[in-house]
Image (cartoon, grey):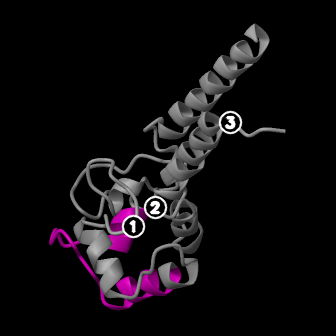
Amino acid sequence: MRLYPAVTTAALLFFGASAAHASSTFPAAIQAHVPLTYAPQCSICHMNGVTGYGTVTTAFGVAMKARGLVAGDVTSLNTALDKMVTDKVDSNGDGTTDIDALKAGQDPNGTATVQAGYGCNASGSGEGSLAALAVAGVLVLLGRRRRAT
């Protein structure tokens, strides 16, 4: 069985798109640890929908990193959240600690209401869907080429 280069490339794009994202388990882990009635969006740590390693840029995210947060490590996330409580961190200086803001459904970086999310990989960017569509398209084209020969 011959593996076509286009299929290999499409598969790498599809699986690589997921790997580039932030820790997709973090929103649910924050929800469980704090506890919250919602899973916060990735925007509490990442700006402009840009996620992935090295892209934590919000005040809340930087404060979490300063308290030991490590990408992909839920234990470090829980430790950092606990330290945020102990240190009474108020990233935006509004008089409400970050964790209390999250509990109230507010963005700890500002005053907006936090919208529930479904993890960093399902934040509505559609990148995973586009990759799946690209793979499907390549497979259809290869199937047509095979029938033509």
Q: Total of numbered circles in the picture?
A: 3
Q: Residues within 10 Å of mark 3 (few under 14, many from 20)?
A: few
Q: Which mark is residue 53?
A: 1
* Element assignment for label 1: loop
| Label 3 to label 1: alpha-carbon separation | 31 Å
Residue at 32 percent across and 71 percent down: it is: 61
Mark 2 or mark 3, earlier in chain: 3
Q: Mark 1 belongs to which amino acid?
A: Tyr
Q: Mark 3 belongs to which amino acid?
A: Tyr
Residue mark closest to the camera, 2 vs 3: 3
Q: Residues within 10 Å of mark 1 (few under 14, many from 20)?
A: some
Q: Which residue is mark 3?
A: 4
The span shown in magenta is 78-103
Residue 149 x, y percent position in the rendering: 76, 12
From where the camera sits, is residue 97 visible? Answer: no
Judge by depth and name the residue closer to the eye, 147 or 149: 149
Q: Residue furthest right?
A: 1
Q: Which residue is mark 2?
A: 22
Residue at 22 percent across and 70 percent down: it is: 59
Q: Mark 2 belongs to which amino acid?
A: Ala
Above or below, comparing residue 139 to residue 22 in the picture: above
